[in-house]
Image: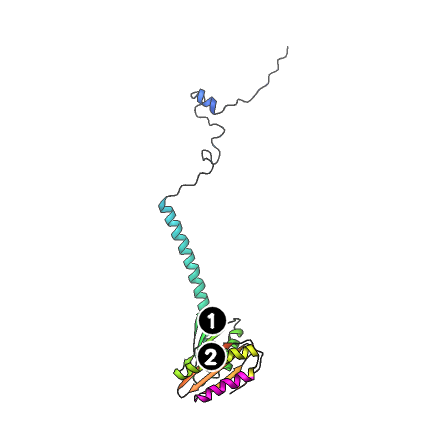
Amino acid sequence: MVYCFQLRPARFGDADLQEKPDQYAGLQSPAEGRPGAGAGKGEWVKLSVKQIVVMALTFLLTVGILRLGQWLYTQSAIDAPLLQAVRAVPGVQSATWLNPDTLTIALSPSADLMATYEAVKLRASALGMTVTPVVAPGRPDAVLRQLDNQIHFAVAQGEATGQYVAMDQAILAMARARGVTASVELGQSHLFITLRRGAAYYFEVLPVALGGGGAHG
């Protein structure tokens, strides 16, 4: 006679462990021993206040070091060479950064405003940069300041009518009436105005919507 036996692996779960704790001592339930066992869904990793502070300080320190490195690179590799090149342009007395894209330049009293302005832009372009020069007004007196206010009205009329010649003549006539020597030049997108009266002088670059061309007073 032949007997056949079928062997089945013993299975037990949490209920068996609770019913016979001594028999299954030292054994783990299927849920135990797995990575993350015992951690409920939605639970957060608990961090101490000290750990959070250390992490925050490390982050801030890293950001600070990166920004410092960027600033040092900009100063040594970009800003300094450009300032050096601009200060070497004839007519420029000083040059400083107003913001990352704008350069403030102070001119000598005898400087040619339009030529100096364009030369600064060319120097920046040669170094692979595009900057907008802002020309310091110079040393105007009360007469030049008052005249400048009137010039703005004449420029607005010239833009509205497109009559550059009439605008130029109006500015020169106002200047002569006050004993002021004026120079007006029109570039591709800016009007360059220089006013001189004794030791006082005034430079102004105005954006205009007129065509190219130029005239000297």
The answer to which of 180 and 201 lies nearer the viewer is: 180
Examine the rendering and report whether any part of residue 201 can be seen: yes
Q: Local crowd at mark 1 within 10 Å, few (<14), some, or many (≥20)?
A: some
Q: Local crowd at mark 2 within 10 Å, few (<14), some, or many (≥20)?
A: many
Residue type for callout 1? Thr
- Residue 82 percent across, percent down from the top left: 47, 73
Q: What is the number of the mark on residue 164?
A: none
Q: Report the predominant secondary structure element of the magenta stretch.
A: helix
What's the CA distance linking mark 1 and mark 2? 16 Å
Residue type for callout 2? Glu
What SS does tag 1 mark? Answer: strand
Residue 160: quadrant of the picture? bottom right
Q: Earlier in the sequence, mark 1 or mark 2?
A: 1
- Residue 99 percent across, percent down from the top left: 45, 69
Q: Residue at x 53, y 79 (%)?
A: 157
| Residue 177 belongs to magenta span | yes
The answer to which of 101 and 80 lies nearer the viewer is: 101
Residue lying furthest top? 1
Residue lying furthest left? 50
| Residue 157 belongs to magenta span | no
- Residue 54 percent across, percent down from the top left: 37, 49
- In the rendered image, the vertical position of residue 16 relative to residue 65, given as above or below: above
- In the rendered image, the vertical position of residue 171 relative to residue 40, given as above or below: below
**Residue occupied by mark 2:** 204
Q: Which residues are magenta?
A: 165-180
Badge count: 2
**Residue occupied by mark 1:** 102
Q: Residue at x 49, y 87 (%)?
A: 173
Examine the rendering and report whether any part of residue 214 can be seen: no
The quarter of the image holding the N terminus is top right
- Residue 63 percent across, percent down from the top left: 43, 57
Q: Residue at x 46, y 73 (%)?
A: 103
